[in-house]
Amino acid sequence: MDLQEFLQQLEKNGELRRIKHSVDTNLELAALARREFARQDGKAILFEQVQGSPFPLAVNLFGSARRMSQLLRCRDLEHFSEQIEQLLNSEQGSAVERLRKLSVKAETVVEIEPRCQYRVLENLSSLPALKTWPLESGRYFTLPVVITKHPQTGTQNFGIYRGQIIDEQHIALNFSAGSGAAEHLDIAHKNNSPLSVALVFGSDPALYWLASAPIPAACDELAICRRLFSTALTTTACVSQQLNVPVDAEFVIEGEINPGETCFEGPFGNHTGCYVTRDDCPLLRVTSITCRDNPIMPATVVGPPLSENVFLAKTSECLLRQMLKIDFPQIIDLEMPEMTIFHGVALLSIHRQSSKTVKQLVEALWADSPLQKSKLLILFDSDIDLQDFSTAYWRLINQIDEKRIYRSGKRLAIDATGVDLNTLVVEDEQTVKQLRQRFADFNL
């Protein structure tokens, strides 16, 4: 399934709104997208006429659990979590070892005449890109799947990073320290070599989840995608760089980052609710731009939560939960509140043995786990429903104690476990049973 097939399915299911009137990418389009997302029945939007560009643009693709489930070929996110559990349980070892085994067992097919290279574009000027907030200094690509390759192993990495258009041939590509692309860039520059990069727009929408998910380094996301979704995922060689990209991409921007070439990026209105800047952003020199016939540009509107990309990030919970259960058997469940998900805030229910074992678990999670960068971890007993935030918060407040708070740099963990269930205030079961039989007598 490529992007256009996904949009056709959304339209068939009443999940797509077409806007035929001309729209401005300078603030207007983003404002419309935010208002559609805020609607209870908010839909994906296809803007058919974008000012300054011959290409239509689609937003709010991930803006509901329904659309995410359709994108991931599952009934709902609980079903998707079961699919991930089944896939991981088909292998042995740690969670990372299982994912690496899965990624080498599925090969992708390479095509010589791909759709994504139907047409060559001269420069970036005709591509639709967004200015989403008033103080932003330029237009941004907000939804590229950025592909880089490890200079030594040849393993490709997929990530989603914003890109600010600097001029017709250059992009400020903001991948953060610790990302796969940053690791590849560091290795390439130590060898005094440029890093090849491809920005892919469109293709199978499931790739957006894989590019944003906590897939460990040295794992092939395309191979995992093929195993998880039973899809062919045919690729092709780039025109100007030694990378492989999906053949069904809408647009592909190829380029390279030369050693030491950086630029000022921003201001950009991000998920913190504040504008951010970066003065050492990698500068991508564009070497080729291609597209398929009649392409559609996908984009997302970034900003304070809740925003549509929260649903994309929320889906990663399904993978995180199963990975943590494999490596830390004392963990029962995981929930990440939507308002704080981009900071890695996690609520965990656990089998508790003692305060010492809780501290050891926190230290292990911070040392080597998908939650090692989480700003806040809160641990609960197994009786707490993590999706019931009010009850979880009530339990937390009543358990807070200096000895239960752990700190490591900017990270914080709170132990809210250890409640004796025999001391909980609950109604008498026999009385409740009698009341059910006498509701009519009391006019209840």
Image (spheres, rainbow, N blue to C red):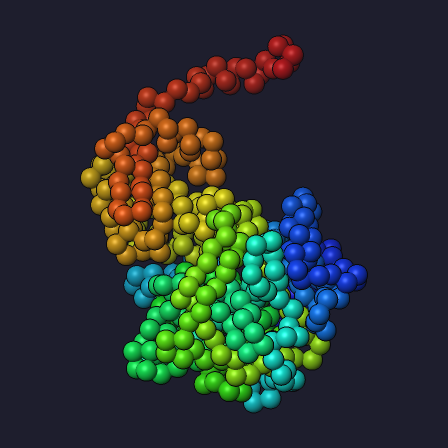
User: Going by the picture, which residue comes out furthest to the left?
Assistant: 356
Up-down relation of residue 58 to residue 434 (above or below): below
| Left or right: 414, with 102 as reference point | left
Q: Is residue 430 something that shows in the picture? A: yes
Q: Is residue 312 something that shows in the picture? A: no
Residue 246: image location, x then y, percent: 54, 77
Location of residue 295 (image quadrant):
bottom right
Location of residue 166 (image quadrant):
bottom right
Residue at (23%, 42%) from the top-left corner? 359
Residue at (26%, 54%) from the top-left corner? 367
| Left or right: 302, with 27 as reference point | left
Residue 19: image location, x then y, percent: 76, 59
Closer to the camera in the image, 6 or 17: 17
Up-down relation of residue 382 to residue 132 (above or below): above
Question: Which quarter of the rendered picture does the N terminus lie within?
Answer: bottom right
Location of residue 289 (image quadrant):
bottom right
User: Going by the picture, which residue comes out furthest to the top?
Assistant: 441
User: Going by the picture, which residue comes out furthest to the right?
Assistant: 21
